[in-house]
Amino acid sequence: MGDDIPLAGLISLLVILLLLSAFFSGSETALMSLNRYQLRHKAREGHRGARLAERLLRRPDRLIGLILLGNNLVNFSAASLVAVIAFEIGGQPAVALGTLILTLAVLIFSEAAPKTLAALHPERFAFPAALIYYPLLKITYPIVWLTNAASNGVLFLLGVRENGAELQSLTREELRTLVYEAGARLSPRYRTMLLSILDLEKVTVDDVMVPHNEIIGIDLNGDITAIETIIRDSQHTRMPVYRDDIDHVVGILHFRRLANLAEQEVTKDSLESLLSEPYFIPEGTPLSTQLVQFQRRRERIALVVDEYGDIQGIVTLEDILEEIVGEFTTDPSDEETDVIKETSNTFLVDATANIRELNRSQDWNLPTDGPKTINGLIVEMLETIPAPGTRLKINGYPIEIVETDDNRIRSVRVGRHIPTLS
């Protein structure tokens, strides 16, 4: 062979073989490093390289068989060629040295370097490689099929079964990780919204409802002047109507229907004729479920009841949407009343404030898996209503009781979070 081809030609052929080896090694790493979800997205957008890469990865055994066939072919050919070149240059002693040099060259230039580069930029290498591998697989299919049949037979004997290469469903926590890792591709606002959607199943209507003692409604047994005042000053478009107390609810009044009474005197009977049936839901209903139910029933407001049918609170579609997008309406009368900043390290907090809302507005991390208010959280922990001046620590937050009455804590002072050493 050396007599027919000049030494320069043999060296050139060796360089070409090393480049081919680098191509096979790097493209294998690139194809296997592709993000399968990004790949599917690009394929659906019509990217030719992505579509071919997706087809190839549906049967990774065939793809790997093709790459190994090509890689081994060029590596063995390069080894034989080095032996010829070394023998021509230095005779038999140079063959061993040539083998060592070839090993280092393949390791550095045909394996480590291309694989590292391909792992860092998989799409840049995988998509052009797919354009080559797809037709090449068609040409070499009989050889690849025989190779895969033999290798799959060995795996079968070892108890390994093929499960395909379809994309697996992601769990909620895996989706949360993907959203977190999106980085600058998602604005902080959109990231928060997506995470809130993923958390809807963890949050129940109990967490966002207006509690029983804070429900504002219309008492049909009350004075008509007081009823007119409530309607005129209301910040809501819908309101429960009851007799004597909210436990005896009659229906829901949509203020838009009051336009029918614009030229008539408002009476209790006329108001009662405008009411729609109240919609009751059980406590503990996940927000994700309730959002679907609101949509199916075309409702926007529901009364939350316990297992005995007693009303525990009221929840609206707006409450659920605010869990996703944050506050988008503000009642000026309620603004900044739950938390008052005393110093740079302390806050005076209304003990009836909802813990989830405090965590969200103040970026705190108080526990939300138990009672819904600061008052309930402290009473559950101490198993008594503490006296003013009592101090405790919850999740690293120093808390001091400021004011109490006979049956509840009215206000507390919350200090800056102190990390708990584990």
Image: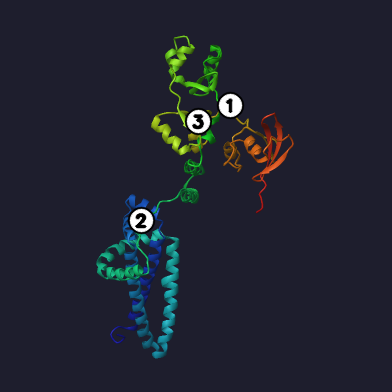
**Between 239 and 188, the one nearer to me in the picture:** 239
Residue 416 appears left or right of 202: right
Q: Amino acid at mark 2?
A: Glu
Determine the image quadrant of residue 95: bottom left
Residue 337 appears left or right of 40: right
- Give the CA separation, mark 2 to mark 3: 43 Å
SS for dot 2: loop
What residue sits right under mark 1 in the picture?
A: 213
SS for dot 3: strand
The quadrant of the image that shows the C terminus is bottom right
SS for dot 1: helix
Determine the image quadrant of residue 359: top right
What residue sits right under mark 3 in the picture?
A: 304
Q: Position of residue 187 (x, y in %)?
A: 49, 44
Please identify the residue farthest to the bottom as the structure is shown.
92
**Category of crowding for the residue at label 1, using alpha-carbon neighbours closer than 10 angstroms: few (below 14), some (14–19), many (at least 20):** few
Q: Amino acid at mark 3?
A: Val
Q: Position of residue 77 (x, y in %)?
A: 33, 78
What residue sits right under mark 2 in the picture?
A: 166
Q: Residue at x 42, y 71 (%)?
A: 111
How was the colour assigned to the protein in this rendering?
Answer: rainbow
Q: Amino acid at mark 1?
A: Asn
**Category of crowding for the residue at label 2, using alpha-carbon neighbours closer than 10 angstroms: few (below 14), some (14–19), many (at least 20):** few
Q: Position of residue 355 (x, y in %)?
A: 59, 37
Q: Residue at x 43, y 32 (%)?
A: 294
